[in-house]
Structures are given as structure tokens and as C-alpha cells.
Amino acid sequence: MNWILVCPYRRLQPERGVAALVEDEPVAVFRLHDGTLRAIGNVDPFTGASVLSRGIVGTRGDAPTVASPLHKQVYDLGTGVCLDAPEVRVPTYPVRVRNGLVEVGWAPC
Amino acid sequence: MRLVVVGNGMVGHRLVSALRDRDPGGTWEITVLAEETRPAYDRVRLSAWFDGEPLDLPAVPGVEVHLGEPATALDPAGRKVFTRDGAYGYDELVLATGSYPFVPPVPGTDLPGCFVYRTVDDLEALRAYAEGRSTGVVVGGGLLGLEAANALRTLGLATHVVEFAPRLMPMQVDEAGGAMLRRHIEDLGLTVHTGRSAARITEGQVVFADGGIVRTDLVVFAAGVRPRDDLARAAGLAIGARGGIVVDETCRTSAAHVHAIGECAELGGRVYGLVAPGYAMAEVVADRLLGGTATFPGADTSTKLKLLGVDVASFGETTGPLDVTFTDPATRVYAKLVLSDDAKTLLGGVLVGDASAYPTLRACLGGPLPAPPLSLLAPAGADARRPLPGAAQVCSCNAVTKDTILAAIGSGAADVAAVKTCTRAGTTCGSCVPLLKGLLAEAGVAQSRALCEHFDHSRQELFDIIRVRGIRTFSELVARHGRGRGCDICKPVVASILASLGTGYILDGEQAALQDTNDHFLANIQRDGTYSVVPRIPGGEITPDKLIVIGEVARDFGLYTKITGGQRIDLFGARVEQLPKIWRRLVDAGFESGHAYGKALRTVKSCVGSTWCRYGVQDSVGLAIELELRYRGLRAPHKVKAAVSGCARECAEARGKDFGVIATEHGWNLYVGGNGGFRPRHADLFLSDVPTDVLVRTIDRFLMYYIRTADRLQRTAAWLECLDGGLDHLRHVIVDDALGLCAELDAAMAAHVESYVDEWRSTVDDADRLERFVSFVNAPDAPDPSISFGVERGQRVPVAR
Ligand code: SRM
Ligand SMILES: Cc1cc2nc3c(=O)[nH]c(=O)nc-3n(C[C@H](O)[C@H](O)[C@H](O)COP(=O)(O)OP(=O)(O)OC[C@H]3O[C@@H](n4cnc5c(N)ncnc54)[C@H](O)[C@@H]3O)c2cc1C
Ligand code: SF4
Ligand code: FES
């Protein structure tokens, strides 16, 4: 597992995402209300646009979620599953904070 | 067995559909002979044809309708009806031939420019002729005449109404009501001539019996109707003294196997000129044809005038043993209740200027009063709504009682639409729809108003909670009044409420996390993840220098450029990291955010107006700019669009807007509640001929009241349609200040105007705020590799994926 530097933790706003390039892949990193982080693929599978980091963060039941800003499908930020179309899912990535810096895990296949 | 129906009007259509409903086995084969060439339509709403509204009545399957094939003769002995092309034998025959408009027998009525007002064809001819002409006269000051006069007015003609009787609507309202009505009608700019009759029509003028003259381009006769009894008369059927085919209470005529219903029938010496008695007759005949024993129950002759802006209603008796009246010259309201001599039973009444109590009062006709008379009559008396008795007739057009409606609700009808289909209540003139809503609520089937899984409240309730409790963050709100951490439904709603309440820059602090992506980046997201940029161009007016700046910015950033439908320019294809650079240049050249991304004021469209246009009567551009600058940045439940036209030709399409202003010789007319889009609706006239300060104050209140009370994503049109009491209620609140809210609404708007700052200027001037405009946090200037462009007609466009 390689850990790729994304940005200082303080750049992240609560309940908002940012996009980062991780080995040329666009990844969306979110800071939840409790301060923990989640990372999923940034590409909206329905349109191919690289936009999921710009969606609204919230919850459905207990699951933390993001809604695509284009057509509002909602994704579980823990599993990457699209809750409005469970056959669709986006990749998820490990994410951690070290020395105040956010890093996304990348496993070369 | 074969049934032939002559006449495919409202009543004939009702007979056929009632019979088909109740005769699923198809005992009757039905043939309808129709003179008109269009399928049956709703004549009561005829005037709505000018607004392009569909009038068609639902088609009845399994009926043979011969459009454009009038019956020409009738042979009751041989049981045959004849048309130009053939003969139809019958077992039973129903005549439903309606009325023809009465045209007074004076010289000149056959000249071009003379019209009647009865069919869609009449309206089509009238509209075509009125095009480019300026004056019209309506002969007849009754219900129909005033409706026709309003139509002429909306066609842009200076309109005169001539009435032989000493007051308007002599059949419905009494002397004092007529006087109040006249004042209202004159306020609308119509010229009223009562106590006068037309003696002669000549080319270009109407000459009165008293020798006076009015110059006019056209004349509409709306002086009453006469039963179409010619067919029956020629066949030797009994005809009433003043016309009408004589029928008994089962609607049988003097000839065996021949019935007559609707406006062509005379029952007990009386011909009914309204649709409700006709429908009742249709139901009787349908029942009898299937072996029933129904008889005509007698009829309600209540009416409510639909003349825009002035409410007039009359029901039951208009004078009687005991009259209670209420007159308020200031608000121009006149009301009267006719009571039995023990003052306990409601026998009838007249309402002018405010008819909000009409549905309730009409439903109480013949029964005890639900509240003391004066509390019902005084304006806002409708708020004194009391439960109606079960036998009260809620829908008089279709004779549906409260009990019938409650039964339908009990068996599952859960909204107004369902109640309409089950009971027919509310499907004709629509005036009882507010009562249907009330009954649904009374029966406890109000729909859940919960916004989403995080809040059990409606938007309006959240607005009040936030305002009254002074809540300033989503976290506080959801912790105290909701659950979870919100979603893409409730967060933007709360963001919009906070913005409407003036909480400053929308991306500061926690508010940033609430905004939809468009508001978050102050631009409109496109299919490929790029954004469009729409600078504000107030009123659509722009200098050449500013146009050049837009052109240069578009060229330098390679943006696709298009003129929008809202009189401004949209620049498409900006990547997120380009937005601040683009706006730096636009802000420096004096541009501001156009809020194309926000649920907020969009544009105030204008026509060129009196500055240049040879027809313009006011400076429409000047007012549009003033209004756009006043309301710019105002966030609302949905977007808000407006327009100002410089004269009645309406080149700015103001009646298609949330609020629209049309210049008159004397000031401005204000229209509210229009929109284009998914379900187009023309705005309703709200104020006439007012000066600019009254206009602006009223729009202020209209917008603030809308912002406080509308649902999420509810445009003003839908809001007004759902508002209990509709336009009348709105008038009470924002003109008469019946709820004492106006000072608060005024203050809220003053605070908005005071605190407005351009969002893009506050963004480009602040390094922290600019931080979010990067493509990737770890490669801020790397363009998103998934974005690529092709070229179409010389401009960049997204490559289709
Ligand atoms: C750009 C423009 C089309 C154009 O090229 O002319 C446009 C573009 C969009 N319209 Fe529109 N509308 C535009 C004029 C109109 C008009 C005409 C007008 O304003 O005179 C209408 C009908 C009038 C009306 O709204 O009453 C119109 C009715 C809609 C509707 C339907 C609203 C409704 O109540 O039914 C939507 C959908 C919505 O808002 O929910 C919509 C939504 C949209 C959105 C925001 C859809 C979206 O979410 O992506 C489009 C994005 C704009 C962008 O990216 O900049 N647009 N849209 C026009 C921008 C005008 C401006 O200067 O701001
Ligand atoms: C502008 C306007 C507004 C109105 N507003 C209201 C209102 O608010 N409330 C209300 O209660 N009423 C209102 N009315 C009156 C209402 O429309 C009539 O009461 C209702 O239409 C009567 O229905 P009907 O079927 O008897 O006659 P109609 O609807 O007139 O239908 C008769 C049909 O028979 C056809 N016909 C006639 N002779 C023949 C023949 N020989 N062969 C074949 N076909 C023939 C005619 O062409 C016509 O289509 C309004 C009327 C108008 C014009
Ligand atoms: S609406 Fe405006 S542009 Fe159109 S004719 Fe009237 S003043 Fe002229
Ligand atoms: S009273 Fe006219 S539709 Fe109900």
C-alpha cells in the first residue's frame, strides 16, 4: 500500500469534499461531521463526469452519504454502493491523517 | 335500444357520460348529433380559451358522435331525426340544444365587427378581428357581458359596457351591490353606461336610444340568451310562453319518447341559464332511461363572477324578509345576507369585492347559519370557517353534499384530485375546491408534510422555527428539531431559509456545507462537470463596452457563448479553477453575479418601452432595472422571474412571470403568480393603475410572504394555487394587512436591500474564499483530464460521452 499525500487536514471543511489526483485517478475525500474521513472515486458512474467531491454530504439512516451534484443519486461513503441503484458502486479508498496531513492509500494491482 | 341526443354541449355530454357510467352492459346504443365541429368542451370556462387553456371535456368511449352534423328536422310520430345527410331512428330522443345569444333587433347588427360570445368559434373570430384595433363595446352588463368585457380588455381594447337596466348585473345583485360593482369595474379602466340602450350600429359607432354615440371598432352582444327550441317548435312540441321546450319534472316533453334538458328546456315556467340545473336534468334522464324514478330536484342559481380582480357572487334570494348588509367604501366591499324572518335560516346573499365567504355560505343555503351573520360578512369572514352540516351542498355545480364527499374520503380518496374523480365535485366552476381541501383536512387525511427523513416539518414550519428561535446553524436546527446529519433535500432548504433571513455570505462557516453544488461554486454545473457563468444584466440593458468585455472574456477563456431566454449572456465550459479568474475580470468591468445558479431572483425582463417604442406609455426599462437591483440576490423557495412591459402589447411577456408589470396610461398593472416552464400559467391581475411606490411596496410584500410560506421548490404559481383563499387571501394579507404582517414583511425586504453585496465580488476579493476553486487539492492548476471539447458551429462544446 502506498500512501499518497492529499492536503493538510485543515483544508477540509466539515461535511464537504475535495477532489485529489491519486496516481492519476480522481479521488473524492470527505470530512464528516465527527471529523473522520472517507474517500471514494470522484467519477459519477451515471454521467462519467468527475464531480462526486462536489455533492452534499449527509446521512441515510446511519450511513454517511454523498449525493451526486448532477442527478442526485446517493452513495454510501463507507461502501461506495449507490443506495438508489445498488447494482452500481464506486471504488472506495483507505484514508488517514498523519502529522496533520491527509493521505489516501493506493494498492498497485 | 337506440338513444339519439341532439346537441353535444355541456349538458348533452353530461347525459352521455352519466349513462355510460351507469350502463356498463351497454343497454343503450348512443348517437350524438352535434352542430359544433369540436368535441364537447367546457363552456363555463370559455374565456380561459384566450389564455390557451384546454377546455375539452373527457371523451366518452363507445358513443357515436357526428361532429358538424346538426339535426334539421324531427318526426316524433315516426321516431326519426333528420340531418342534411341522413335520418336517424330512435327509441328515445333527448334534445340538449342549449341557447343562442340574443341580439337586440336594431339596425346594423349584421355589419362586420359585430360578434356574440357563446362558442370557441365566436372567440376565435373575435380575437382575429380585435388584432390591431383599439376600442370595443359590449352590449349587456350582466354576468356574460362583464365576462366578455374583461376578454376585450385583455385583448388590449379600450372597453365600454352598455346596460339597459339602471345597474350592472341586474339579475344577480341589488342596487347597492350594483353601485359597488360599478366602482370596481371602472377601476379596471372600463367605461360603464347604465340605463342606456343601443338603438343602432353603424360602421365604427354605436348610437344610443338617447342620441349619444360611442365610437368603436367592434361590438359584442352579450345581452342574454334564448332557448334553441326551433326544432321542437317546428315538430309541434309544446313551447313555453317565453320560449323553451316545455318539460315536466322528469324532463319529458309533450311528445312521447322525447326529452329535453339543459338551457333549451322550460320547467315550471322557468328556463335555467346555468350549467348546474342542466346537469341535474341530465342525471334525471340518465336515471329514467335505466328504469329509475328520479325527478328534477329544483335548482340552485348561485353564481360567482370570474371577472379578474373583482369578485362578485350571488346565491339564493337577493332580497327577502330580513337583510343584513355590510358596506365598506374604503375596501369597496359590499355584502348582504338574506335571512328568514326569525333570522335563523340563510335564504341567499350578494357579495361584491370579496367573495371569499361564498363557498361556505352557498353550502349553508336553506339551513342554519354557521356563525353570527356579521362575522361571516366582514372581510376575512372566511377565516371564521365552521364545520358545515352533512347535508350542505358543497359543490353546487354537481350537486354533491358534504356527506358524499366524506364518504369518498372514507373509502380512500386522499387528495383533491381523487375526490374530484370519485364525486365530480370541483370539476366544473372550481369554486368549491377550497372547501374540498378543508374537508380533507377535517377528515384528517392531510398529506404528510415532512420534508425528508431528517425533519418532520414542512419548509414553512422550518422557516418559522428558524426565524422565531433565532437559529443560525444547521447543526443547531437538526440537533433540536430533526435527526441525522441531513441530505441533499433538507440542507439546501435550510441554506435558502438562512440566506432569506440575511445571514451573510452563503459560503461562510457551516453554511458552505449546505449549498447545492451550483451555490457552492456560484455557477451552474453542466453535464461534463464544467460550469456556466451568467453575469447580471439588469433589465437586459447593456452598454457596448460591457458587451465587449463579455466577448473578450469568452474569447480568452474559450467559453461557448449563448444569449439566454432571460435577456442575458451565458458563458459555458468554465473549469472550476477558471471561475475566479473569469470573475476577477467581470467584477473589474462592473459586472455582478446573475444568480443563474441560485433559487433566487433571476431576471427582470423588459421591453424597450416609452424611451424608444412608439406605443410605450411608461419607461419599462427603467422600472425593470430598478426592480432587478432591488431584489437581486434575494433567495427564495424557488427561482423568481419578473418582467415589465411598456404597454398592453406585452412584449416582455410579463404575464408569464412570477410577478409581471404592465404599464398603463395612469400607472402600472401588477400581475402575480405566472410562469413558463413545465406547467405554464398566466399571472393574475393583482393591482391596476397604481403609482410606482405602491407597486414596489406590494411586490416587496408579495415576495416576502412567498418566501415565508411556500413549500420547497414551489414556484409562486403553484404556491398561489395551494394558498387557502388564493388571491383574495393574498390581498387580505399584503394589501389590507389583515394579519398585521405587513410591517414585518416591509422590514424584512428593507433589510435585504440594505445588506445586499455581490457574492462574486466578496469571493474574488478574499483569498480564503478562493481556496475552494481548485480542480484538485494536490494539483490545483491541473485541468480535469476527463474534460474535453469538440467544435460545433465555430464554438467549443463538450465531447459526448
Ligand atoms: C440558460 C437558460 C437557457 C437558455 O440558453 O436560454 C436556462 C438554462 C437552465 N434552466 Fe431554464 N434556462 C433559461 C431560461 C428559462 C426560461 C425562460 C425565461 O426565463 O424567460 C424558462 C421558462 C420560464 C419560467 O421559468 O417560468 C425556464 C424554465 C426552467 C425550468 C422550469 C421551471 C418551472 O417552474 O417549471 C427549470 C427547472 C427548474 O428550475 O426546476 C429550468 C432549469 C434550468 C437549468 C438551471 C437546469 C439545470 O439545473 O442545469 C439550466 C441551467 C442554466 C445554466 O447552466 O446556465 N429552467 N428557463 C436560460 C437562462 C435565463 C437566464 O438568463 O437566467
Ligand atoms: C362565456 C360563458 C360563461 C358562462 N359561465 C357560466 C358559469 O360561470 N356558471 C354557469 O353555471 N353557467 C355558465 N354559463 C352557461 C353555461 O355554459 C350553460 O348553462 C351550459 O353550457 C348549458 O349547457 P347546454 O348543454 O344546455 O347548452 P350548450 O352548452 O350551449 O350546448 C348546446 C349544444 O347544442 C348544439 N345544438 C344546438 N342545436 C342543435 C341541433 N339542431 N343539432 C345539433 N346540435 C345542436 C349547440 O351547437 C351546442 O353545441 C356560461 C356561458 C358562457 C357562454
Ligand atoms: S410592450 Fe413595450 S416594446 Fe412592446 S409595443 Fe408596448 S412599449 Fe413597445
Ligand atoms: S361548485 Fe362549481 S365545481 Fe363545485
Image (cartoon, grey):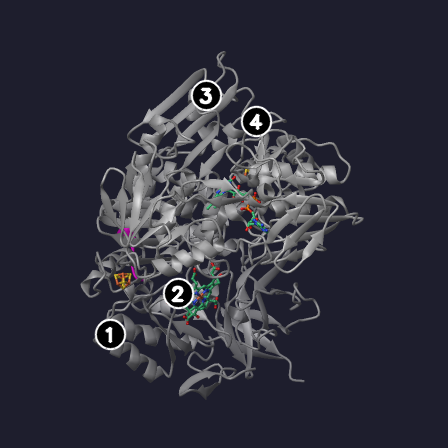
Q: Residues within 10 Å of mark 4 (few under 14, many from 20)?
A: few
Question: Quick one: label 2 or label 4, which is nearer the N terminus?
Answer: 4
Q: Chain of mark 1?
A: B
**Mark 2 or 4: the one toward you:** 4
Which residue is identified by label 2?
B596
Q: Residue furthest left?
A: B611
The residue carrying mark 4 has its beta carbon less than 8 Å from ligand 4: no
**Mark 1 or 4: the one toward you:** 4
> As displayed, is residue B371 above or below residue B514?
above
Which residue is identified by label 1?
B546
Q: Position of residue B329 (x, y in %)?
A: 29, 29
Dot 2 falls on a residue whose secondary structure is loop
Specify the segment rendered in magenta.
Answer: B753-758
Question: Quick one: label 1 or label 3, which is nearer the N terminus?
Answer: 3
Q: Is residue B756 magenta?
A: yes
Could you say which is closer to the camera, residue A26 or residue B465? B465
Q: Do the dots labelled 3 and 4 sit on one chain? A: yes
Instruction: Give the residue type at disc 1.
Output: Lys
Which residue appears at 53% of the width and 45% of the height?
B458
Dot 3 falls on a residue whose secondary structure is strand
Instruction: Give the residue type at disc 3.
Output: Val
